[in-house]
Amino acid sequence: MLQLHHPLLDVHPEVATALAERQAVVALESTIISHGMPYPQNVATALQVEAEVRAHGAVPATVAIVDGRLRVGLSTADIERLGQQGAEVPKVSRRDIPFIVAAGHSGATTVAATMLIAALAGIRVFATGGIGGVHRGAAQSFDVSADLQELAQTPVAVVCAGAKSILDLRLTLEYLETHGVPVVGYRTDWLPAFFTADSEFPVDYRLDTAAGIARAMHTQWALGMRAGMVVANPVPAAHALPRERVDAAIATALYEADQQGIGGKAATPFLLARVNALTGGDSLLTNIALVLNNARLASAVALQFQLIAG
Ligand code: PSU
Ligand code: MN
């Protein structure tokens, strides 16, 4: 493993070569593997996403913490281990990184932690399923994902299918606006809501090409603006779920979380798992389809960005 930029960082040789040769690289997160999907579909999906990135001309860099090292680019064995151990692997957001590293432990990185580590390695494009956000009831719970603060301060474009409506999408957009984080809709005027292709909330800017997105990224960062960017890519129509079904499952999951007093970092994994269970296998198929779709767009954006940034 080569070390780039930082003594705690291990960049996989393939990724290091790609970065050195200014090829397109796409970062991928690992909380989605350990906490976002059941085994063995989580491992199969993670490997399929990497293959999809390669098939579209970019190099995948799945990020995690392994035995106290920040790892950018995992082996198949690493991914298998994170997937098999599932919820036993600590979920690592920004504040958790130093403690997991200092203890020499392993951890699955959230959007926030993956962005931070990707930026340390010099990667500017990241593909995932959905980002965290402002939770419903946040006026009481104060539950706002650290993903939003990371987007405010780390210059990485996150290609996602919007956010699940376990969150308050309106407040999530308000928070991002306050912190100077643009939300771009890819070929859509509306914020996608993960399982469904749209919501009632407009995006800030609609861009219809990967090149247009790459130009906006380059311009934002050339201006010295340090924020990231949300690139919202709607789930393909063939894989979207009926809104009523999703809404019913989310309402039940939120009620159960409230009844069981689930909060803090456990809230999102609990809600995701309950929504998955309540919508049966269908939501998992939708989840897999949209992550692959995001991997394709992220690869195209990374290629275009490299053409501009050189
Ligand atoms: N939303 C999803 N799938 C996910 C997550 C969120 O639809 O897998 C994961 C991501 O890793 C995200 C994290 O960064 O949950 C947010 O957790 P929290 O709300 O605790 O910040
Ligand atoms: Mn939270």
Image (spheres, grey):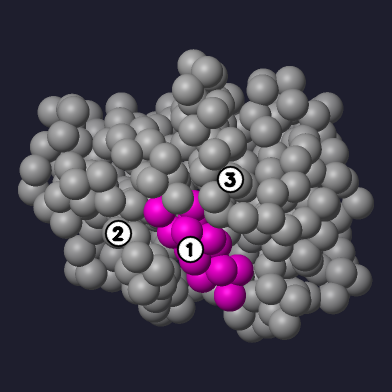
Camera-side mark, 1 or 3 = 3
- Residue 299 inside the magenta-drawn segment: yes
Amino acid found under the numbered disc labelled 2 = Val
Look at the image and tell me whether residue 188 can be seen: yes
Look at the image and tell me whether residue 43 can be seen: no
Amino acid found under the numbered disc labelled 1 = Ala
Camera-side mark, 2 or 3 = 3
Q: Quadrant of residue 49?
A: bottom left
Instruction: Return the mark for residue 172.
Output: none
> Which residue does the image show at 85% across and 55% down from the upper left?
199
In the structure shown, which secondary structural element does the residue marked by tag 3 occupy? Answer: helix
Q: Which residue is mark 1?
A: 295
State the image coordinates of residue 236 (x, y, percent, origin top left). Answer: 69, 73
Q: Which residue is mark 2?
A: 59
* Residue situated in front as seen by the camera: 86 or 69: 69
Q: CA distance from mark 2 to mark 1?
A: 11 Å
Q: Which residue is mark 3?
A: 213
State the image coordinates of residue 32 (x, y, percent, origin top left). Answer: 48, 58
> Which residue does the image show at 78% across and 66% down from the upper left?
196
Q: Residues at badges 1 and 3 in contact (C-beta under 8 Å)?
A: no
Q: Is residue 36 left or right of residue 137?
A: left
For label 1, the crowd category at 10 Å Cα-Cα, with few meaning under 14, some 14 to 19 and many 20 or more, is many
For label 3, the crowd category at 10 Å Cα-Cα, with few meaning under 14, some 14 to 19 and many 20 or more, is many
Mark 2 vs 1, N-terminal side: 2
In the structure shown, which secondary structural element does the residue marked by tag 1 occupy? Answer: helix
